[in-house]
Image: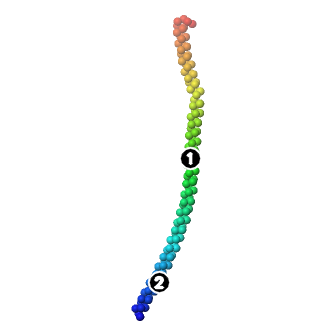
Amino acid sequence: MAEHDELKLLLQRLADQNLETQQSIFSIDKKLDLHIQKTEYELRGINDQDAIQNKLLDQHIEGVNTLKEIFQQHEKNDVERFQKLEEPRKFSKWAVGVLLTLGSVVGSIAAIGKHLGWF
């Protein structure tokens, strides 16, 4: 009977240890589930923030492209305005050149005419 009692005691200890192990596993399982839930919640938040940041980035890129187009159009308009502003200067430079050439020719003719006695 003593052997039977020892086996019974051994089985009881194994049952108790099994129960403790099951409780530990259950406790760890609960902690793991909570950790998974927290991670899913945080991941959802990260994904939401990512979507917001992507939208803001798209708006920023759109604004940069708009400013680039405005700048390019402004540069084109500036080139046209500067060309229009240069026209009177170019004309006056051309006119001065014509007048100087004409003056030189007239002066040369007058000098030759005076030398030949035409005047």
Residue 79 placement (x, y as % from top left): 56, 34
User: Residue most toward the top?
Assistant: 117
- In the rendered image, the vertical position of residue 26 relative to residue 60, given as above or below: below
The colouring scheme, among rainbow, by chain, secondary structure or one colour, is rainbow
Q: Secondary structure at mark 2?
A: helix
- In the rendered image, the vertical position of residue 66 relative to residue 47, given as above or below: above
- The C terminus lies in which quarter of the figure? top right
User: 20 or 113: which is nearer to us?
Assistant: 20
- Disc 2 marks a residue whose amino acid type is Asp
- The N terminus lies in which quarter of the figure? bottom left
Near mark 1 (Cα within 10 A), the count class, few <14, some 14-19 or many ≥20, is: few
Identify residue for label 1: 64
Identify residue for label 2: 16
- Disc 1 marks a residue whose amino acid type is Val
Residue 110 placement (x, y as % from top left): 55, 11
Residue 38 placement (x, y as % from top left): 54, 67
Q: Residue at x 52, y 68 (%)?
A: 36
Labels 1 & 2 near each other (Cβ < 8 A): no
Residue 16 placement (x, y as % from top left): 47, 83
Q: Residue at x 53, y 12 (%)?
A: 108
- In the rendered image, the vertical position of residue 72 relative to residue 88, given as above or below: below
Near mark 2 (Cα within 10 A), the count class, few <14, some 14-19 or many ≥20, is: few
Task: Answer with mark 1 or mark 2, whichever residue precedes in sequence.
Answer: 2
